[in-house]
Amino acid sequence: MAGEAGPRVTVDALVADGEGQAREPEGIDEVPRIGEETAESLTAGDLFDPAATARVVVLWVLTPTVAAVASSLVFRLVPRL
């Protein structure tokens, strides 16, 4: 492995086509440019995801609860040093 030269990759090779011309990534037409989206084009689902909010709230409560239970068990089961 040591001493073997791998293929040379440059930044220009990643964004250029065979003739060295820069090209747009595929699917770029589906994403509006920054500042082009309007408030009318956004839906409530774009602005608020109830499932994400539920996950945050559940983890917000569950994480310290699990930590408190685990630490309580450790302090009761591990003998004092």
Image: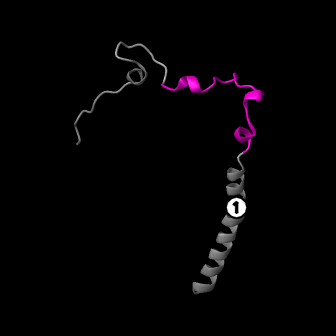
Q: Position of residue 59 (x, y in %)?
A: 67, 60
Q: Position of residue 63 (x, y in %)?
A: 66, 65
On the rendered structure, is 5 left or right of 65? left
Bounds of the magenta span? 26-48
In this view, the residue in front, 51 or 18, is 51
Can I make out residue 24 in this image?
Answer: yes
Q: State the residue position of label 1.
A: 58
Q: Residue furthest right?
A: 39
Instruction: Quarter of the image for the C terminus: give it.
Output: bottom right
In this view, the residue in front, 52 or 3, is 52
* Residue at the image position 70 percent from the left and 61 percent from the top: 58
Q: Quadrant of residue 48?
A: top right
Residue 52 on the magenta segment? no
Q: Is residue 1 above or below residue 66?
A: above
* Residue at the image position 72 percent from the left and 50 percent from the top: 50
How many marks the image carries: the answer is: 1
* Residue at the image position 68 percent from the left and 73 percent from the top: 68
